[in-house]
Amino acid sequence: MGRAAHLVRRIGWYIGSLMGDNHYDRYLAHRRRHHPGEPVLSERDYWKQRHRAADLNPQGRCC
Amino acid sequence: MATTTSRSEEHSGDITYVRTDPDRPPVAIIDRSPISARHKVIFGVIAVFGAVAWAIVAFARGESVNAVWFVIAAICSYIVGYRFYARLIEMKIVRPRDDHATPAEIFENGTDYMPTDRRVLFGHHFAAIAGAGPLVGPVLATQMGYLPGTIWIIIGAVVAGCVQDYLVLAISTRRRGRSLGQMVRDEFGGFGGTAAILAVLAIMVILLAVLALVVVNALAESPWGVFSIAMTIPIAVFMGLYLRFFRPGRVSEVSLIGVVLLLAAVAGGGWVAETSWGADWFTLSKVTLSWCIIGYGLAASVLPVWLLLAPRDYLSTFMKVGTIALLAVGILIARPVMEAPAVSQFATRADGPVFAGALFPFLFITIACGALSGFHALISSGTTPKLLEKEGQMRLIGYGGMLTESFVAIMALITASIVNQHLYFVINSPGAVTGTSASSAAAYANGLGLSGTPITAEQITAAATDVGERSVISRTGGAPTLALGMSEVLHQVFGGTGMKAFWYHFAIMFEALFILTTVDAGTRVARFMLSDALGNLGGRLTKLRDPSWRIGAWACSLIVVAGWGSILLMGVTDPLGGINTLFPLFGIANQLLAAIALALVTVVVIKKGLLKWAWIPGVPLAWDAAVTLTASWQKIFSADPKIGYWQQHSQYVAARAAGKASFGSAKTPEQIDAVIRNTAVQGTLSIVFAVLVLMVLAVGLLVAVRSVRGGGRPLTEEEPVPSALFAPRGLIPTDAEKEVQRRWDALHT
């Protein structure tokens, strides 16, 4: 039971990391580690900034 | 960041622990332990198993070979290549330093620079490099039988494609994640750099055009396919709005909703295509479809990313990983047998109907992605280094990622080889030879002298009806054949005969989804490259370098779209059949890009003083240059009108001068004019590509010779910065890595 739950959590973590669900948490952790005490973006604004960055620096997709 | 470091080493048997901060756990492990007896046995068994599978694939004749042997031969070769060849490259050339920070660590900002778990980055990198290319090329190459393609896909990946991806990733990571064009400029100087950037731009335009042509050929006159693909646009926009305004960041959730809607669209397409309004609205000609895709590419290039591009990319990633896994499971459960011969009659001739030209060089052009793809160099430089945690992980990401793509290509080859061979040629030969009716197509295929029972007109019609299409005759481009093969595999495992049509359209939908994702992202990337290149010219054009200048964005997007759009329209209206004339250009373009990337890598290896190991990128470079330049030469100078663009051009010019109303495949004077125009464009493009790449290669050779003589431009590697984080190298962490990881975890909690 414990092992199965662990496995499901790991798969959930993998998909979340690949698709982006936990990217905001990752950003918060980064701010805590490197810029403690400084203000952070809200989740909505974080994604706005991500997409603005993607607007200005598009990532290729291969054939 | 401080450049002074208190680097210290601690030895414990064969393992060395490296610290950059005496108060923290080690950031790197140097493991010199020899291979254990257990591993020797395991790899020995894998090697023997692989050799047996290769023997069966290569030498079994007269009886049908099971597809499972291809899977085994491929996987065993990949394991051996990864464990030994990639390791050799790592030890002799790359020499990763895990005590040096990667660009992701140096510039970490929580958004685009972010050290990412190696397994997650593997997924990102794979999703970025793999698309429709490895699915389409092997299908066309099956014209020559399964064996030549299988050998090239597996061996080519291990010694060429993976080496390119891995080494480009390595040199870009040591240069703060610079792009391929910038690196060529830095190492080769301004002239070589400019030629390389122009080549990249021209190559991207032709790649986008041919990929779009594949989609158009798969969707033309297919209301079911057009409906399900058209629905991906409102679905993506819905996902974009959902993420922007309703639940930001819930990407998996919205992707899952998107996939369910997509499956509903595929299922619903069958019903829509049956209704009279559905058939009216969604039965589109090739020309109309081309204009739709051109409009879509333009819109995707100028609209904000969050609205269309990003959500489509989520959908595409989800589908990519899911469908490829589904196909692998399907092949292993259904275990189909090969219908194609090992080596067909067309392997020794130069006049195959699917693509013209002899096995050398044209097989190696037709299968580009999956064995060696220059386009990957654009992902390995720039994109992936920004997310890489440790230099030691580059082998897994760069080399391993390409191995996975090669495996996708093998599955595509299997899928095309299990289709009835008569049917294969009915689908993949141009309309000019098959005629338009089932009986003329059957007569054509039966006249080819293929082995196996001849096909009847009824069987051709039934093959179309089974998958819910009106016709499968001359549906060139590879996608319909692959979809037919996939429906053959998947209906046996999931859903039975009743599901055949669903699986066919599912396969068409996901191929089109991949391609449109490449087309929209590629148009945008090419737009940025163009505005950058023009902006560098100076004067009033400098303003173009500001990407938020809307007029500039529109103008550059229009130029890019006009470039690939005009070639696409030329392809769909080509009286000779667009795919067989344009696909070689696509392959040549992609492989020429690989020549630029491999030349860069080889020069860097020589500049580093590793002349002894320069053969590692040098051999694939020499092979690739031989293949692409021979192919270019034949495309430009061949006296065989089926191969040489200019020979064909002059024949049609002569026909027009003689006042003929029809000539060859051209049935009207307008079609004669079209052939004259198209061959001129294709011939000119061949010359431009070859000349640009020859210039880059010549400069590369010059730089290499100067370097060997002890002079020339210096290497442009950046000063290393000490790393302050730890992460395991390989997929499975070693005991020492687990132990160090525990100490870091204890520090953070």
Image: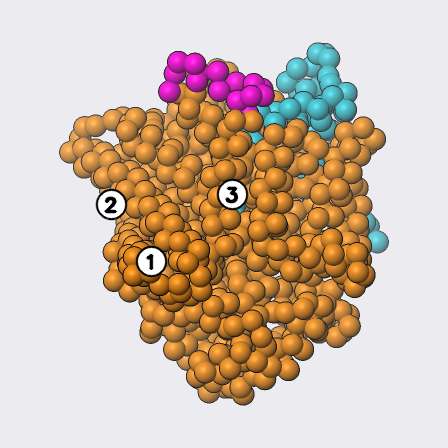
Chain colours: A cyan, B orange
Q: Amino acid at mark 1?
A: Arg
- How far apart marks 2 and 3 lie (CA) works out to 46 Å
Q: Specify whether A16 is left or right of B361.
A: right
Amino acid at circle 2: Lys
Residue B694, position as x, y percentages in the image: 26, 42
Q: Which segment did they paint magenta?
A: B537-553
- For marks 1 and 2, the one nearer the N-term is 2
Q: Is residue B746 above or below residue B596?
A: above
Which secondary structure dominates the residues rendered in magenta? helix
Q: Residue under mark 2: which chain is it in?
A: B
- Name the amino acid, label 3: Gly
How far separated are the C-alphas under marks 1 and 2?
Answer: 57 Å
Residue B549 seen: yes
Residue B656 marker? 1
Disc with the residue nearer the chain's start (3 vs 1): 3
| Identity of the residue drawn at 71% across and 33% down | B307
Question: Circle 2 — which element?
Answer: helix
- Which of label 1 and label 2 is nearer to you? 1
In the rendered view, does B674 fall on the left or right side of B636? right
- Give the residue number, with chain letter if any, for mark 3: B565
Q: In percent of the image, x 45 and y 29: which residue is there? A: B530
User: Residue B724 location, x and y as percent?
Assistant: 55, 25
